[in-house]
Amino acid sequence: MNVISLSPIDLTMAALLVVALAFISFILKLGLTNRIIIAAIRTVLQLLLIGLVLKALFAHVSLLWVSALSVLMLLIAGREVMARQQRRFGGVWGYGLGTLSMFVSSFALTVYALIVIVGTDPWYTPQYAIPLLGMMLGNTMTGVALALDKLTTTAWQQRAIIEARLILGQDWRTAIADITRDSVRIGMIPMINAMAAAGLVSLPGMMTGQILSGTDPVEAVKYQILIMFLITAGTGFSAILATWIGARHLFDDRQRLRLERLS
């Protein structure tokens, strides 16, 4: 099956739909016009850039360059996690918490999938490594951001309740346990919903892309199942780790609530 190439005119016709949406946003005074246009421009530039980078990586397979691109993707994802929170930890904690949790889960599961499950040779083959890591980071980023935002916002709103529990003799884990559980639950909901709706309500992006490129639908389905299981596990592990570390950082060594650590 031949892949149907898209011309600049085809992409322009699709872009006009986004322009129309931005115009309607302006008419309705939704305050989203600039954000829509800027996001669309960023999409074009960023995807064109990564397309050129991947083309070069595919032509010259190198662990050094694959690792460099992977670290860059992780650092950008860490910044996005911090930016999506209403109340976030100040200083290095605000950036490092999400970055660390995604590194531990996403990188570990990606390497595990490449070596043990897919079995690529070499294991860092960019055709598999970069797209897989990108999907892992993209989804765990959302889960971690939601979990941390829920944790810090709820802790701020319920600070009197938490401090009352501490006064009654509870340790920090017990005092904030219900908030921690809700935060992890919120972080995992998007992927749980995605798994529940896959194949019935939606056709996931990777599977759709493979089918459009001519891959056998059954083979595309198998890869999609693998990806969704990895992403769900990675999101869950990242949300649990980030929430636990974040909750601990809300208290000092004497188990006193320290919300001034939030910005």
Image (spheres, rainbow, N blue to C red):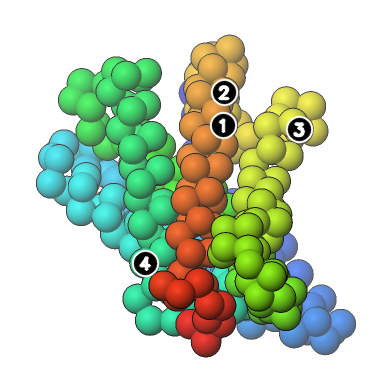
- Amino acid, disc 2: Ile
Q: Which residue is label 4 attached to? A: 96
**Left or right of 105, for residue 39:** right
Secondary structure of the residue carrying numbered label 3: helix
Q: Position of residue 221 (x, y in %)?
A: 58, 19
- Amino acid, disc 3: Ala
- Amino acid, disc 1: Met
For this orientation, the residue located farthest to the front is 169
Give neighbour class at mark 1: few <14, some 14-19, many 20+ (Cα, 10 Å): many
Q: Position of residue 155 (x, y in %)?
A: 66, 72
For the residues bearing labels 2 and 1, Cβ distance under 8 angstroms: yes
Secondary structure of the residue carrying numbered label 2: helix
Which residue is rendered at x = 57% and y = 58% of the image? 173
Residue 228 badge? 1
- Residue in the foreground of this view, choosing between 4 and 68: 68
- Going from N to C along the chain, the mark reached first, 2 or 4, is 4
- Going from N to C along the chain, the mark reached first, 4 or 1, is 4
- Residue in the foreground of this view, choosing between 83 and 62: 83
Secondary structure of the residue carrying numbered label 4: helix
In the displayed structure, 101 sits above or below 46; it is: above
Instruction: Give the CA separation, mark 2 to mark 1.
Output: 5 Å
Secondary structure of the residue carrying numbered label 1: helix
**Left or right of 232, for residue 25:** right
Residue 225 badge? 2
Q: Is residue 108 visible?
A: yes
Q: Which residue is label 3 attached to? A: 197
Give neighbour class at mark 2: few <14, some 14-19, many 20+ (Cα, 10 Å): some
Rendering quarter of residue 183: bottom right
- Which of discs 4 and 1 lies nearer the camera? The answer is 4
